[in-house]
Amino acid sequence: MIVEQIWTGNAYRNFNYLIACPETGDALAIDPLDYTKCLAVAKERGWTISQVLNTHEHGDHTGGNQGVVKATGAAIIAHKNDGGRIPNMDRGVGAGDVIKVGNTVELECLDTPGHTMCHICLLSHTDQPALFSGDTLFNAGAGNCHNGGHPEELYETFSSQLDLLGEDTLLYPGHDYLINNLEFTLDREPDNRAATDMLESYRGQDPDNALVTTLSQEREMNTFFRLQSPAVVEKLIAEFPELGDKPDAKAVFLKLRELRNSW
Ligand SMILES: [Zn+2]
Ligand SMILES: [Zn+2]
């Protein structure tokens, strides 16, 4: 499996992806908003884009679909319940469905509601797994729930799916929000050494050559994975006594998500 992370350079800081089979040159485009750039990269690498996967229905993820389809005739794949919102969908997928790319790549669909209620993440069946997480999980952060999502569902997705992924899983999110998110982690947990070090190392990084984290790193510096951290919990309790002495993981997650909205 070859992964090409494509930086759009737009105001929303979107990442697009091409996933290619090294044997056949067949490729899948994930959320190819900057379709011109995606098509150019595919051409340069000698790849043929035969499928487009939208992680969810927001315009900054689907806006390039028709440009890719017009140039390549690619099939559009998205969450099976998103047909009404994504025009010209060819295939609807749900939990456990597998998308094949060429003859070497298999991507498993995870049904991950929260950012929106129809959101798909892809998990590669490779020696070192890779998660294409759309707007569900970001480097050092979690997706918001303002536009069709729900924080309780997002918590469920984290606790019942993302928490179970292996430590060496590589993370490929839909946006570059690394720096802002690290600053939020440090606002919540000022002594977090991993977040401090990462902020120092990657402030001003070139998004064309962005850091790719593992889930192991995320669990150290992403506050939404640190619901049991005594420092995170103690600070929350001090500021929000209504949480009680021993808030459970869900209450901590929901409070963090709420604070991140206005931070
Ligand atoms: Zn979105
Ligand atoms: Zn987005």
Image: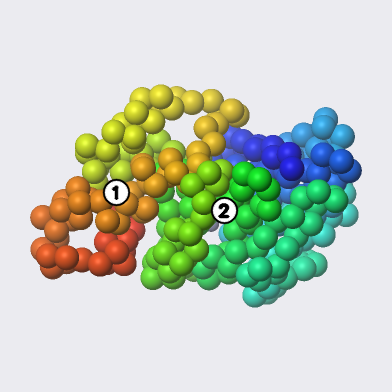
Residue in view at x 50 percent, y 63 percent: 161
- Residue 175 in view, yes or no: no
Residue neighbourhood size for the residue with mark 1, other residues' Cα within 10 Å, grouped as few (<14), some (14–19), many (≥20): few
Residue in view at x 49 percent, y 47 percent: 167
Residue in view at x 20 percent, y 66 percent: 247
Callout 1 secondary element: loop
In percent of width and height, residue 229 lies at 25, 51
Callout 2 secondary element: strand
In percent of width and height, residue 221 lies at 36, 42
Mark nearest the camera among 2 and 1 is: 2
Residue in view at x 73 percent, y 39 percent: 2
* Residue behind mark 2: 134
The residues tagged by marks 2 and 1 sit, at their Cα atoms, a distance apart of 22 Å
* Residue behind mark 1: 263
Label total for image: 2
Question: Within 8 Å: ligand 1 and the Cβ of disc 2?
Answer: yes
In percent of width and height, residue 168 lies at 53, 44
Q: Quadrant of the N terminus?
A: top right
